[in-house]
Image: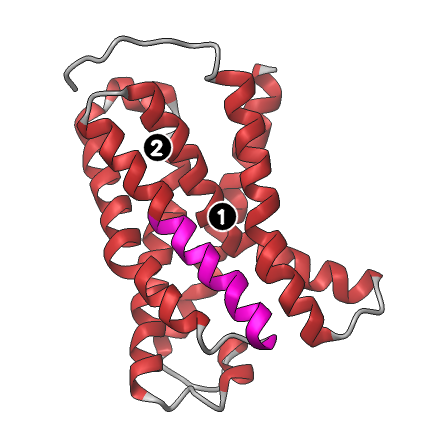
């Protein structure tokens, strides 16, 4: 089980860093690259464009910090760094990525159902992260760890979204707009399902008395 966990962590981290790298070109501030090519109707709308850059800034911080927060050896050896990175992660989501994601969801592809899927994702992202923060402030370390797993599962939706779209496009005959609707839901749903499985296998049997950090 430990080896499987280590392999899973490596794969997750590589995908997270890959997403970080492919997001960097957006900081050229060009309006005709990648995702922005399909957002030409709003790409020159200043509120949306501002929200987009705030969103990717918060997302890049969260997706790249998250994996290293789960490494027990790093937490023990560099506890102060763990706390600092945790504060950056929480701030990046609660004040940058989640609120702007909620706003951008109103302009999502796929019509109403696509927007609803992304709205729910943003709300789950904010809520799971806030509860992770709240639990550690209460010194409930196990509950904190559970909510952090859920939080990063939603964070990782940015990766799974980009995996589901080409998979469904290549291996099904579903209309592209409907694929966007589907992925707006399954990109976070299956991630959270996987998170609950991890929690059930690793944390639900543990009890830990509250202690000062």
Tell me if mark 2 has few (under 14), some (14-19) or many (20+) residues whose alpha carbon lies within 10 angstroms of its own: some
Numbered marks: total: 2
Q: Residue at x 35, y 80 (%)?
A: 48
In the displayed structure, 38 sits above or below 142; it is below
* Image-based side of 23 in relation to 10, left or right: left
Tell me if mark 1 has few (under 14), some (14-19) or many (20+) residues whose alpha carbon lies within 10 angstroms of its own: many
Residue 203: percent from the left, percent from the top? 46, 17
Residue receiving disc 1? 156
* Image-based side of 62 in relation to 36, left or right: left
For the N terminus, the image quarter is top right
Residue receiving disc 2? 69
Residue 71 is labelled as none
Tag 2, which secondary structure?
Answer: helix
Residue 83: percent from the left, percent from the top? 20, 32
In the displayed structure, 144 sits above or below 62; it is above
Closer to the chain start, of discs 2 and 1, is 2
Magenta region's main secondary structure?
helix
Instruction: Give how far apart the Cα atoms at labels 2 and 1 are.
Output: 14 Å
116 inside magenta stretch: yes
Question: Between 174 and 85, which is closer to the camera in this rendering?
Answer: 174
Residue 159: percent from the left, percent from the top? 54, 53
Q: Nearer the viewer, mark 2 or mark 1?
A: 1
Q: Residue at x 44, y 37 (%)?
A: 150
Write down the quadrant of residue 212 in the picture.
Answer: top left
In the displayed structure, 172 sits above or below 204; it is below
Q: Are marks 2 and 1 in contact (CB under 8 Å)?
A: no
Magenta span covers which residues? 110-126
Tag 1, which secondary structure?
Answer: loop
């Amino acid at each position: 089980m430990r080896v499987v966990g280590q392999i899973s962590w490596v794969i997750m981290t590589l995908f997270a860093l890959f997403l970080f790298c492919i997001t960097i070109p957006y900081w050229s501030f060009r309006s005709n690259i990648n995702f922005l090519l399909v957002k030409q109707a709003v790409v020159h709308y200043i509120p949306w464009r501002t929200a987009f850059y705030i969103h990717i800034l918060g997302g890049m911080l969260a997706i790249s910090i998250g994996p290293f927060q789960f490494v027990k050896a790093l937490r023990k050896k560099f506890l102060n760094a763990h706390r600092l990175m945790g504060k950056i992660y929480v701030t990046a989501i609660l004040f940058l990525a989640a609120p702007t994601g909620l706003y951008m969801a109103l302009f999502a592809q796929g019509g109403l159902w696509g927007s609803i899927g992304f709205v729910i994702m943003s709300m789950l992202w904010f809520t799971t992260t806030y509860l992770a923060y709240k639990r550690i402030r209460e010194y409930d370390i196990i509950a904190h760890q559970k909510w952090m797993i859920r939080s990063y599962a939603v964070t990782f939706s940015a990766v799974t979204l980009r995996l589901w779209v080409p998979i469904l496009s290549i291996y099904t005959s579903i209309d592209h707009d409907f694929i966007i609707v589907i992925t707006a839901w399954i990109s976070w749903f299956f991630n959270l399902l996987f998170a609950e499985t991890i929690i059930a296998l690793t944390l639900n049997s543990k009890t830990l008395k509250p202690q000062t950090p």
